[in-house]
């Protein structure tokens, strides 16, 4: 008879928790020794008054130094600039190579008008078409005017660019026009790299926002130029609000907003009706053809495809019917690649001047499909086909600007990376498919971790119709040096219905980092502040971001920033990644977490899609059985490091190529790690005297003798570009960096509530979706029932693509990782004492008795208090000792095997491992000088490192 109440209770629990997963109910018990240790630990309320010191990136700090000027320095600089100006204008090289070209630019005719407006108005809007010279000439016009007046030292110009590549290339070009090198009068500051100039400095919008944290009024800057404002990236839109306030506080500051499109009136009204100057650049005539024209041309030669036939339908999508939930205009149907190839070949055959053909496609897959068709065509021998995509190497990108081989026509297959900042002079024809990839997010409603009837978000990677502004930019790539044509593979009717401009990024991305930055700059309530944006985001988007920040502990219940939030805002990563980094310092796995944080920005594997099968095999081998995309990336870095410290430099490129690793990406990861660790040092989480920093460098003298790389142990935490160095943290904060269970638990702390449960091959489920598919490149895509160590996975994000919902960036985690570090005090954990069942977030179920659950709650409270105190005062020795004991308990639990229930003999256990970096013992020597030691050159492959490395378990 007792079964009846239990049955009723089970029926009730299923009814009240419709998302519940009954197939994976784990038995949770605590070993007696751990329970006793928990009882012995006292839960002490976190106390302390440690103040969060300001942290400034090294590159931004160098820019600050360049902007600091006293009257004497300004006078000296004025004299230096005047002398340089005299030398330049008297130079025969300058007169022959640059004067004529600069004066031929369209902006030259407007020079006096522009300078007069800049002098007379706090804000000027300069709208100039591509190639008019606004970006390279305006900063020089302003500086030269000050210099000729003897006031050059008073002129400090900062120019923002949306992309790092543009900041560097434009600074280099201006320096050349002034017969100088970068770092003299003209310089740049981007992430990880700074070569500041004395008077003109280019930087990204993100760097300027970091600068504003240290210098809210931009003291020392006389002119601020914000370029490419029409691109509407989130940093630029945020910056415009700050600039609007800044020109009131700084009436002496002169601001110029530059755009390549005619959206200038909207920006003018935003700043209260400031003057607009339009500059029309010269270009040769460009003929414009549409899909209807190509249909006629194809008909004349009896060629027909889905698009290239007179009665083709379904090729026009109207705004009302074609809008996605995010407001983007989705492209109708799939691309007709045969039509694209036919159009390219027609352009090649009809161009008697043998100019190049530039083709705009949405992404890499479309580039590859088009290339395959062209290579299989009868015209292949006459074509020199080149991809222009962010993933191709610098050398391959450079080929796009070089002349093609003799008797070949250059065909460049590009994404929107070629719309601006890239000038290929010999392009005579642009083929525009009229589409682009846009990432946006859509709102899902349901019960979430924070409360009932809440919302969550899911990213969507859409192929959308390009805006009219994008289309104009693409057209401008032709006709630079000769008459040209643009062939738009969309109907004229569709072109007329395009949006004027692309959807601002602030409307299609998460706002967590932006809201946190607003709070860290003491700008008030994010919701109210963002209502002042030129195109304010929805209230729901801001509220969703604030809820996620609350769950992270970055804001309190009133929406005020916490001390943890201020800490998180100092790191140039997403807030949830920043929290992982800080947890890594407290839980003793910092080096691994630094690598993981760096890999979110850079993939250590080759991005060459032509060797994707090789990359996939390399991922599987390097994964070390971890069943984790993140640990796989970490192992790739550590494996490469072992090879770097044992192999001659001349063998490394071949080795990395065989392992399908990206050397450029791995070097970038090393730089990011150094940057993050420097900030942690400034925040007090790591003492600069706390152990050694291991950096492997190629020793030229040893290389000359054919010997192996040497290792330098350095006490300092220096920052530089260090292109050939490796960075590893070898301090006490990284003592457990190879404990895979602990590292995965830290990942869980950052990703929760993004939890998915394995169902069967290539299928997962989560709370909101019954069927989820891993990305094809994920380790989760190849797992079978027999392979899965634990059914629980955390993931970075959900992606909606066509009819499938996918998850990106997966890691298999222990159930204890979810309970101890994934859930927080804000997470709903409901307990049914009649069934001895606990339910996390309304869907993850585990069996536990009330006494054990109470002990688990107590352990979670101890961990939370110790971590909170660590965030408040990382130098608290008493708390650090307590945290070390708690870390030991966490390691034991997350690494132990679990039996899901009494009915099965199988165990849930993590068998993966983290590749350890071979750390040699330094020879005796002076502490103040580096010690070079020779390393064992045994390792010859990624698998060799894996075989020689054993996983570090808890205990």
Image: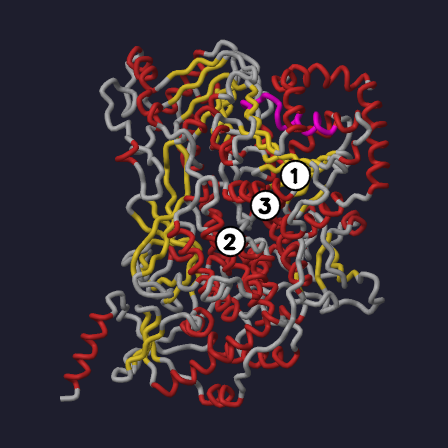
CB under 8 Å between callouts 1 and 3?
Answer: no
The residues tagged by marks 3 and 2 sit, at their Cα atoms, a distance apart of: 12 Å
Q: Residues within 10 Å of mark 1 (few under 14, many from 20)?
A: few
Q: Is residue 101 above or below residue 443?
A: above
Residue 461 pos. (x, y %): 38, 43
Colouring used for the render: secondary structure
Q: Quadrant of the N terminus?
A: bottom left
| Nearest to the observer: residue 467 or residue 903 | 467
Residue 849: percent from the left, percent from the top? 34, 85
Query: Which image quarter: residue 220?
Result: top right
Q: Residues within 10 Å of mark 2 (few under 14, many from 20)?
A: some
Can residue 724 be seen at all in this image of the molecule?
no
The image quadrant that residue 304 belongs to is top left
Q: Is residue 182 left or right of residue 634?
A: right
Stretch of the chain drawn in magenta: 128-143
Q: Which residue is label 2 attached to?
A: 513
Residue 818 in the image: x percent, y percent? 42, 70
In three-dimensional space, the C-alpha distance between marks 1 and 3, rounded to whole angstroms, equals: 24 Å
Relative depth, front residue between 478 and 536? 536
For mark 3, what is the residue? 206
Question: The C terminus lies in which quarter of the figure?
Answer: bottom right
**Measured along the vertical axis of the image, is residue 793 above or below residue 501?**
below
Which residue is labeled 1 in the image? 251
Secondary structure of the residue carrying tag 3 is helix
Which type of secondary structure does the marked residue at label 1 adopt? loop
Q: Secondary structure at mark 2?
A: helix
Count of picture labels = 3
Q: Is residue 657 left or right of residue 822?
A: right
């Amino acid at each position: 008879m007792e079964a009846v109440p239990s049955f009723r209770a089970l029926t009730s629990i299923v009814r009240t928790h419709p998302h519940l997963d009954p197939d994976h109910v784990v038995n949770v018990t605590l070993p007696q020794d751990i329970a006793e240790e928990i009882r012995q630990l006292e839960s002490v309320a976190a106390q302390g008054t440690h103040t969060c010191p300001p942290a400034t990136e090294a590159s931004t700090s160098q820019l600050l130094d360049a902007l600091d000027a006293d009257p004497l320095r300004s006078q000296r600089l004025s004299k230096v600039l005047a002398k340089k100006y005299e030398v330049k204008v008297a130079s025969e090289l300058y007169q022959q190579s640059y004067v004529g070209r600069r004066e031929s630019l369209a902006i030259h005719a407007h020079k006096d008008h522009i300078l007069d407006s800049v002098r007379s108005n706090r804000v000027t809007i300069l709208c100039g078409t591509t190639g008019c010279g606004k970006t390279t000439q305006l900063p020089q016009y302003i500086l030269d005017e000050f210099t000729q007046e003897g006031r050059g030292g008073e002129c400090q110009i900062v120019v923002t660019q949306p992309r790092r590549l543009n900041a560097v290339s434009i600074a280099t070009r201006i320096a050349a026009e002034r017969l100088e090198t970068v770092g003299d009068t003209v310089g740049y500051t981007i992430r990880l790299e700074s070569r500041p100039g004395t008077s003109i400095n280019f930087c990204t919008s993100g760097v300027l926002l970091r600068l504003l944290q240290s210098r809210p009024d931009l003291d020392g800057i006389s002119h601020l130029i914000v370029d490419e404002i029409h691109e509407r990236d989130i940093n630029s839109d945020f910056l415009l609000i700050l600039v609007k306030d800044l020109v009131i506080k700084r009436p002496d500051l002169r601001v110029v907003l530059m755009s390549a499109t005619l959206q200038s009136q909207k920006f003018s009204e935003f700043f209260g009706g400031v003057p607009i100057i339009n500059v029309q650049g010269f270009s040769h005539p460009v003929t414009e053809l549409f899909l209807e024209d190509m249909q006629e041309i194809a008909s004349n030669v009896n060629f027909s495809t889905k698009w290239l036939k007179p009665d083709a339908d379904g090729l026009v999508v109207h705004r009302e019917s074609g809008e996605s939930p995010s407001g983007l205009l989705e492209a109708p149907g799939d691309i007709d690649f045969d039509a694209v190839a036919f159009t390219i070949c027609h352009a090649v055959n009809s161009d008697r001047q043998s100019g190049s053909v530039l083709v705009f496609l949405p992404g890499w897959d479309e580039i590859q499909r088009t290339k395959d068709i062209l290579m299989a065509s009868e015209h292949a021998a006459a074509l020199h086909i080149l991809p222009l995509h962010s993933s191709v190497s610098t050398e391959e990108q450079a080929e796009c600007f070089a002349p093609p081989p003799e008797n070949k026509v250059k065909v460049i297959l590009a994404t929107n990376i070629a719309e601006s900042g890239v000038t290929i002079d010999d392009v005579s024809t642009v083929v525009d498919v009229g589409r682009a990839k846009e990432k946006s997010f859509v709102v899902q409603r349901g019960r979430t971790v924070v409360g009932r009837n809440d919302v969550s978000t899911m990213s969507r990677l859409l192929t959308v119709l390009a805006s009219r502004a994008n289309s104009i930019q693409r057209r401008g790539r032709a006709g630079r040096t000769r008459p040209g044509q643009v062939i738009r593979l969309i109907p004229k009717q569709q072109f007329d219905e395009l949006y004027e401009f692309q959807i601002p990024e602030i409307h299609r991305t998460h706002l967590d980092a932006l809201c946190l930055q607003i709070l860290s700059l003491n700008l008030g309530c994010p919701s109210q502040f963002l209502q002042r944006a030129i195109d304010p985001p929805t209230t729901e988007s801001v509220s969703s971001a604030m809820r996620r920040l609350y769950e992270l502990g970055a804001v309190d219940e009133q929406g005020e920033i916490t001390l943890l939030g201020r800490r998180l805002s100092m790191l140039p990563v997403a807030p949830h990644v920043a929290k992982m980094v800080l947890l890594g310092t407290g839980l003793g796995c910092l080096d691994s977490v630094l690598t993981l944080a760096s890999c979110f920005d850079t993939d250590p594997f080759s991005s060459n899609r032509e060797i994707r099968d090789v990359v996939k095999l390399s991922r599987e081998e390097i994964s070390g059985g971890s069943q984790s995309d993140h640990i796989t990336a970490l192992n790739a870095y550590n494996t490469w490091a072992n090879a770097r410290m044992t192999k001659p430099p001349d063998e490394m490129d071949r080795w990395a190529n065989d392992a399908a690793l990206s050397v450029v990406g791995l070097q970038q990861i090393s730089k990011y790690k150094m940057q993050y660790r420097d900030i942690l040092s400034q925040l007090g989480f790591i003492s600069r005297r706390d152990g050694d920093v291991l950096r492997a460098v190629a020793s030229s003298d040893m290389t000359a003798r054919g010997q192996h790389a040497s290792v330098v142990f350095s006490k300092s935490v220096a920052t530089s570009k260090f292109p050939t160095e490796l960075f590893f943290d070898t301090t006490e904060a990284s003592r457990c960096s190879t404990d895979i269970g602990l590292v995965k638990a830290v990942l869980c702390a950052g990703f929760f509530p993004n939890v998915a449960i394995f169902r069967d091959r290539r299928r997962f489920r989560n709370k909101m979706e019954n069927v989820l598919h891993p990305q094809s490149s994920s380790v989760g895509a190849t797992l079978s029932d027999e392979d899965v160590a634990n059914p629980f996975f955390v993931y970075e994000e959900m992606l909606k693509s066509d009819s499938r919902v996918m998850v990106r960036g997966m890691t298999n985690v222990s159930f204890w990782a979810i309970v101890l570090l994934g859930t927080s005090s804000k997470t709903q954990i409901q307990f049914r004492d009649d069934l001895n069942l606990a339910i996390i977030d309304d869907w993850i179920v585990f069996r536990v008795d009330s006494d054990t659950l109470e002990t688990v709650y107590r352990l979670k409270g101890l961990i939370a208090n110790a971590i909170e105190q660590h965030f408040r005062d990382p130098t608290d020795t008493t708390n650090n000792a307590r945290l070390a004991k708690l870390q030991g308990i966490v390691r034991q639990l997350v690494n132990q095997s679990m039996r899901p229930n009494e009915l099965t003999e199988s165990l849930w256990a993590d068998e993966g491992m983290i590749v350890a970096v071979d750390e040699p013992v330094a020879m005796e020597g002076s502490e103040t000088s580096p010690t070079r030691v020779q390393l064992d050159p045994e390792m010859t492959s990624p698998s060799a490192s894996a075989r020689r490395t054993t996983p570090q378990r808890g205990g």
